[in-house]
C-alpha cells in the first residue's frame, strides 16, 4: 500500500516531525521499513469523558497521544502493535440516539490483548477511511510475519457517565463517598462493596487486580478447572435505557429500570482464556483517563479537520503532476 515510501526522504521527515512533537516524553519511532500511513484526530472514549487524541497510523504500529498544540506538541505517547489489533464496528447512531452535542455517531472499537477502547471519527466517510487503512495495515503485516490474528482482547470499559448505580448489585448509587470502580475482567462500572475481591491475572498484571464478585467466581472456577465453557467474545456493552435521576440521598433499596442482569450476563460470558487488559496496579484506575494536563487547551471533541492518508495523498499528487 505504501511500499514506495519505504526509505524515502519524505517519510523520514514525517516521522522525524512526529518524534519532535512528542519530544523526550516519547519513544523513537524511526526504524528501517517503518512507514507513516496516515494521521488525524479521533475522539477517544475515556473513563470520565470523550477526549480528542492525535492518532498516527504506521504500517506496523498505531500511535496516539494527548494534544497540547496541534501539529507541534503532544504528550502521553501510546504505542499499539498492529499485529494484535482487531476492529469492531459500532452501528451508526440515528437521530434519536445522538449524544447531547450530536457529534459522537461514527465509532468503532480498537481491541488488543492489552488495551481496548472506543474511538469516533467526525463523519461516516472518515470512519470508513480509518477502518479500511487500519485493516489493510493489519492484514499486510500478518501476511508478512506469518502470524495469526489475536483471538483474545481486553474488555472495553463502560464509561462512568453511562450509569449512576452499580451495574452489579443495582442497589448502590454513586456519590462523593461511594466511588465508581471498574472490573478488570468484564469492564462494568461497580461499587466498592461488589469489588472487594482481587484476582491474580498473570497476563494482565503481576499483582492481583480488582474484579467484581461475579467475575471473581468465574475466575476462581477456571483456576480450579471447573469451568470448561469455551471462550466467547461479546459485542460492546451499551446502556440504552436511561437511569432515573437520583441524588446523593437516593435510597440504596431503589432499583433502576435497566436490566443489569442481562447486561451482566452478556459482559461476563464464561471464558477459559484469561483476558489481558491494561497494566494497572491493583488499586489504581487508568492514569490516562483520570489525569488532566493543565497545559491542554484543546477541545475534548473533534474539530473539522480531515485525516491525512499519505498513500491517497501521494496518488492524488501523482495524478495532478501527470495531468499538468
Image: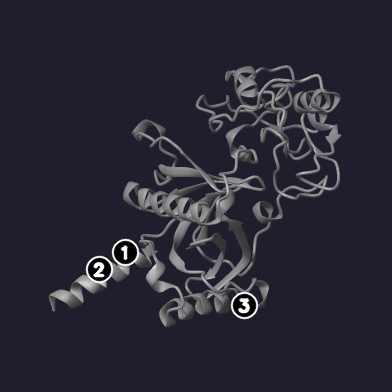
Q: CA distance from mark 1 to mark 3?
A: 28 Å
Would you name the residue on which mark 2 appears? 316
Residue 211, percent across and down?
78, 34
Left/right placement of residue 142 relative to residue 221 reads left
Instruction: List the residue tagged with mark 1.
Output: 312
Which mark is first along the chain, 2 or 3? 3
CA gap, disc 3 and disc 2: 32 Å
Look at the picture and state if 42 lies above or below 8. Answer: above
Q: Specify few, some or many for label 1: CA neighbours under 10 Å numbering under 14, 14-19, or 20 or more.
A: some
Verify CB contact (< 8 Å) between mark 1 and mark 2.
yes
Query: Residue at the spot x=52%, y=79% of the render?
Result: 16
Q: Which residue in the rendered view is the most extreme toward the left?
A: 323
The residue singled out by tag 3 in the image is 23
Residue, x 71% and y 24% (percent of image)?
Answer: 168
Asked whether residue 277 appears in the rendered view, the answer is yes
Q: Is residue 147 above or below residue 233?
A: below
> Where 272 falls versus 68 (above or below)?
above
Residue occupying the point 35% across, 61% down = 306
Residue beneath the point at 42% across and 49% down? 131
Amino acid at each position: 500500500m505504501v511500499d514506495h515510501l519505504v526509505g524515502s526522504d519524505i517519510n523520514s521527515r514525517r516521522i522525524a516531525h512526529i518524534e519532535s512533537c512528542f519530544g523526550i516524553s516519547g519513544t523513537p519511532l524511526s526504524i528501517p521499513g517503518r512507514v507513516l500511513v496516515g494521521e488525524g484526530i479521533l475522539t477517544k472514549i475515556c473513563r470520565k469523558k470523550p477526549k480528542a487524541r492525535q492518532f498516527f497510523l504506521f504500517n506496523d504500529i498505531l500511535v496516539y497521544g494527548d494534544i497540547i498544540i496541534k501539529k507541534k506538541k503532544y504528550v502521553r505517547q501510546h504505542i499499539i502493535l498492529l499485529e494484535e489489533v482487531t476492529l469492531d464496528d459500532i452501528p451508526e447512531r440515528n437521530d434519536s440516539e445522538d449524544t447531547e452535542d450530536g457529534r459522537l455517531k461514527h465509532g468503532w472499537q480498537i481491541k488488543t490483548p492489552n488495551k481496548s477502547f472506543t474511538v469516533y471519527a467526525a463523519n461516516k466517510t472518515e470512519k470508513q477511511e480509518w477502518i479500511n487503512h487500519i485493516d489493510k495495515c493489519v492484514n499486510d503485516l500478518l501476511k508478512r510475519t506469518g502470524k495469526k490474528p489475536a483471538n483474545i482482547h481486553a474488555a472495553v470499559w463502560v464509561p462512568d457517565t453511562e450509569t449512576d448505580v452499580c451495574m452489579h448489585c443495582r442497589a448502590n448509587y454513586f456519590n462523593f463517598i461511594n466511588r465508581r470502580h471498574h472490573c478488570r475482567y468484564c469492564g462494568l462500572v461497580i461499587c466498592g462493596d461488589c469489588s472487594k475481591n482481587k484476582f491474580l491475572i498473570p497476563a494482565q498484571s503481576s499483582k492481583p487486580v480488582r474484579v467484581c464478585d461475579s467475575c471473581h467466581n468465574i475466575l476462581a472456577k477456571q483456576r480450579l478447572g471447573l469451568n470448561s465453557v469455551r471462550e466467547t467474545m461479546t459485542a460492546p456493552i451499551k446502556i440504552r435505557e436511561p437511569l432515573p435521576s437520583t441524588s446523593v440521598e437516593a435510597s440504596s433499596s431503589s432499583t433502576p429500570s435497566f436490566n443489569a442482569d442481562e447486561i451482566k450476563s452478556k459482559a461476563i460470558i464464561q471464558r477459559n482464556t484469561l483476558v489481558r487488559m491494561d497494566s494497572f496496579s491493583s488499586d489504581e484506575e487508568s492514569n490516562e483517563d483520570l489525569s488532566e494536563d493543565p497545559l491542554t487547551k484543546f477541545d475534548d471533541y473533534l474539530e473539522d479537520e480531515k485525516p491525512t492518508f499519505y498513500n491517497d495523498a501521494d496518488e492524488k499528487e501523482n495524478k495532478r503532476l501527470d495531468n499538468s
